[in-house]
Image: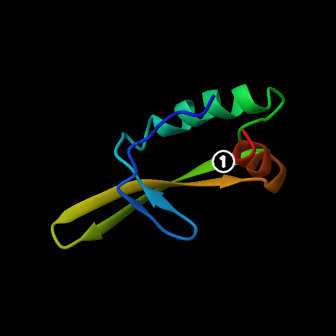
Amino acid sequence: MRKVIEVIYSGENYCIFPGNPYTIANKFEKIFKEIAYTSEREIDWHVEQIAERVGSFIIRGVKIHVDPWLYEKYNNI
């Protein structure tokens, strides 16, 4: 079952959606475990925290790196 996320922007290799970057890894772990129970964080996929200063603001986010086999399974559900 695919979760619906409000996508603010979608590019070739990324998308922007609202949420807490510190809790997103747990949410994706649940999704990936539904797709492939044997998938493991830090082996088949991992999350990279990003923080960048833009003027007086700090922009936070994550990059989610996914192995091709798991990405393919995700796209075929």
The residue under the point 53% across, 33% down is: 3
The residue under the point 79% across, 35% down is: 39
Q: Residue furthest left?
A: 56
**Category of crowding for the residue at label 1, using alpha-carbon neighbours closer than 10 angstroms: few (below 14), some (14–19), many (at least 20):** some
- On screen, residue 71 versus residue 57, left or right, reads right
> What is the three-letter code of the residue carrying label 1?
His
* Most foreground residue, 20 or 13: 13
Residue where numbered disc 1 is placed: 46
Q: Residue furthest front?
A: 77
Residue 11, percent from left and from top:
49, 69
Seen in the picture, residue 2 relative to 47 is either above or below; the reply is above
The residue under the point 71% across, 48% down is: 75
Q: On the rendered image, what quadrant is the N terminus found in?
A: top right
Residue 19, percent from left and from top:
36, 41
* Most foreground residue, 37 or 25: 37
- On screen, residue 4 versus residue 74, left or right, reads left
